[in-house]
Image (cartoon, rainbow, N blue to C red):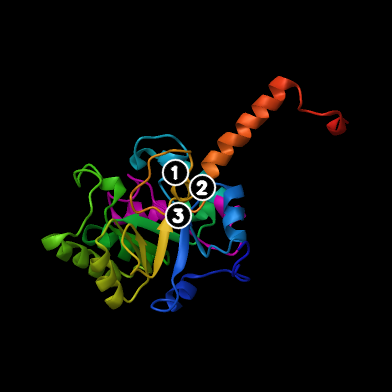
Amino acid sequence: MSGYLVPTKQVRVSDLQARKGDKPWAMLTCYDYSTARAFAAAGIECILVGDSAANVMLGYDSTTAVTLDEMAMLGAAVVRGAGNALVVVDLPFGTYEASDEQAVRSATELLRRTGGHVIKLEGGVRMADRIAALKRAGLAVCAHVGFTPQSVNGLGGFKVQGRGDAAQAVRDDVAAVVEAGADMVVFEMVPAQLAADITANCPIPTVGIGAGAGCDAQVLVWHDMLAVPEGGRRPIFVGVFGAVGAELTRGAASYKEAVEKGTFPTADKDF
């Protein structure tokens, strides 16, 4: 499976838009050079440098803690290893909410420092003006609606968004980001049927995470997708496609044992 449909030229937003309603595509989060190289070799067309780095890379208890400097460092490393994949970079909390000017300043700095291709921000109706401002500045934009982790406290915790009467709010959010010019939109923790219904009538690609199979694309945090760390808690919607966490622990334990027993290093490795 390695190298399955590896892109031979730079993937662009227009390439993914052209696949809408035809062939689903995969996005994974990534935060470093070596992992980006592995995902590029696997043919992953779109990589997200997500603010989930706050949790899985930096050990913060919330995505709101990660800074623009931290995102810039991680994003630049990813771009260096991403090959021809399209790289989307999250705007961190506190860098775009205050004004259109703040959003454009933060986004242009982040893309300049990382070499990324698309900027991502959370919010629908409330962020439509920011999206429009970013588009006027000439940037490609990915919106994010449904459950928005940066607003977890305002949403009352990790809850599905759009059940029952609340479905109209999700529809309004999508309509607002489309009108503002967003190039794609992430649906997080949205009922599958609602996500599928909106996708069928949405002119831009939809990317689901906990939003069912009816979206145009899917995204997962790679640590969830490959079970890192071993035994860690995963959202119910996650699919696990490898046991990397267990293998990391096994390998480190084997190395420790070899050092303690004196079986590593061996004479054939001496200079």
Q: Nearer the viewer, residue 258 or 30?
A: 258
Q: In which quarter of the image is the C terminus?
A: top right
> Does the magenta segment cover residue 227?
no
Work out how far the residue at label 3 is from the one at label 1, CA to CA, in angstroms: 11 Å
Work out how far the residue at label 1 is from the one at label 2, CA to CA, in angstroms: 7 Å
Instruction: Characterize the local packing of mark 2: few (<14), some (14-19) or many (20 or more) Cα atoms within 10 angstroms.
Output: many
Which mark is first along the chain, 1 or 3? 1
Residue on which disc 3 sits: 89
In the picture, measured across the screen, residue 154 lies left or right of residue 24, that is left
Residue situated furthest left in the rendering: 165
Instruction: Characterize the local packing of mark 3: few (<14), some (14-19) or many (20 or more) Cα atoms within 10 angstroms.
Output: many
Residue on which disc 1 sits: 53
In the picture, measured across the screen, residue 201 lies left or right of residue 77, that is left
Badge nearest the viewer, 2 or 3: 2
- Look at label 1 and name its amino acid: Ala
- Look at label 2 and name its amino acid: Tyr
**What's the magenta region?**
78-107
> Does the magenta segment cover residue 95?
yes
> Which disc number belongs to residue 31?
2
Q: Is mark 1 on a helix, strand or loop?
A: helix
Badge nearest the viewer, 3 or 1: 1
- Look at label 3 and name its amino acid: Val
Name the quadrant containing residue 198.
bottom left
